[in-house]
Amino acid sequence: MTDSTERLISSLAADLEPVQPLPRLRSAFVGVLAVSLAILGLVLLGDEAQSGFASILSDRIYLTSFISLLIAAFAGTTSALAAAVPGRHRLELGGILVAWLGLASAALACLIGMRAPGLDAPASPAGLDAMCFRRAWLYLLLPAAAILSFVVRGWAAHPLRAASIALLGSGAIGAGIVHASCGFAAPEHLLIGHLSVPIVLLLLGLFPLSLILRRIRR
């Protein structure tokens, strides 16, 4: 390499802004998990929430949908974070698949419970569906901010896909937290008040978030 070539390369790099390295994928996941667990812990401090958490173990539909929500939350979070890291394409796609399977399993458990013979599920008290829905949106705000801060700073090769799974994963986190603290095990309520949260969040936030990610990539 000649001196003129070295000077040319140095001049080209001189005006570039320094790149801030991303934290490791594992560290980002631990950060999101810590935020989510902190919110869950604060929520479960109340006596009513503790009784709701105890009811998870006594109802199969409640327990199945809760475990499925946890799977969707963990897989969606992992996939969204992997979307911002070059070389993690397989982890991103695998997380998307597992997250959707988790949500589908939770919904299927509720649908089976609604049609189960001999199951006399009480009707939801007035306003309970809307209350749980609003609480889930409140609980997902900080986890969503933690996930999106990593995705926005990274290099998402497919912004639309990264946005969708980030919304899905954070929505599942909010739904899982409210699911753990609700205690009302009617399958219809679980389906409407809890499981609808990640889907509605995805539908409402996908377009504006994908536009933001595309603009940042330029």
Image (spheres, rainbow, N blue to C red):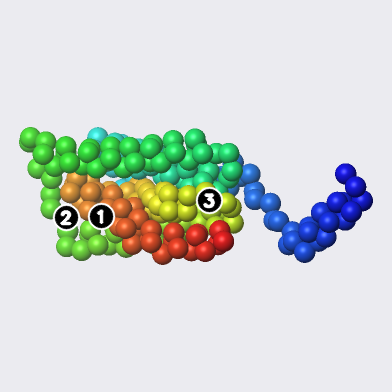
Amino acid beneath label 3: Ala
Between the C-alphas of marks 2 and 3, the distance is 41 Å
Which mark is nearer the camera, 1 or 3?
3
Label disc, if present, on residue 124 of the rendered structure: 2
Q: Residue 64 placed where, x, y %?
A: 29, 36
Q: Which residue is mark 3?
A: 156
Q: Residue 114 placed where, x, y %?
A: 13, 42
Callout 3: SS: loop
Q: Earlier in the sequence, mark 2 or mark 1?
A: 2
Q: Nearer the viewer, residue 46 or 152?
A: 152
Amino acid beneath label 2: Ser
Q: Residues within 10 Å of mark 3 (few under 14, many from 20)?
A: many
Callout 1: SS: helix
Name which residue lies at 42% across and 57% down.
140
Is disc 2 in contact with disc 1, using a CB cutoff of under 8 Å? Answer: yes
Q: Earlier in the sequence, mark 1 or mark 3?
A: 3
Name which residue lies at 89% across and 54% down.
4
Question: Left or right: where does residue 71 sit relative to residue 194?
Answer: right
Q: Residue 145 placed where, x, y %?
A: 50, 59
Name which residue lies at 38% across and 58% down.
206
The residue positioned farthest toward the right in the image shown: 3
Callout 2: SS: loop
Q: Nearer the viewer, residue 174 or 153?
A: 153
Is disc 1 in contact with disc 3, using a CB cutoff of under 8 Å? Answer: no
Amino acid beneath label 1: Gly
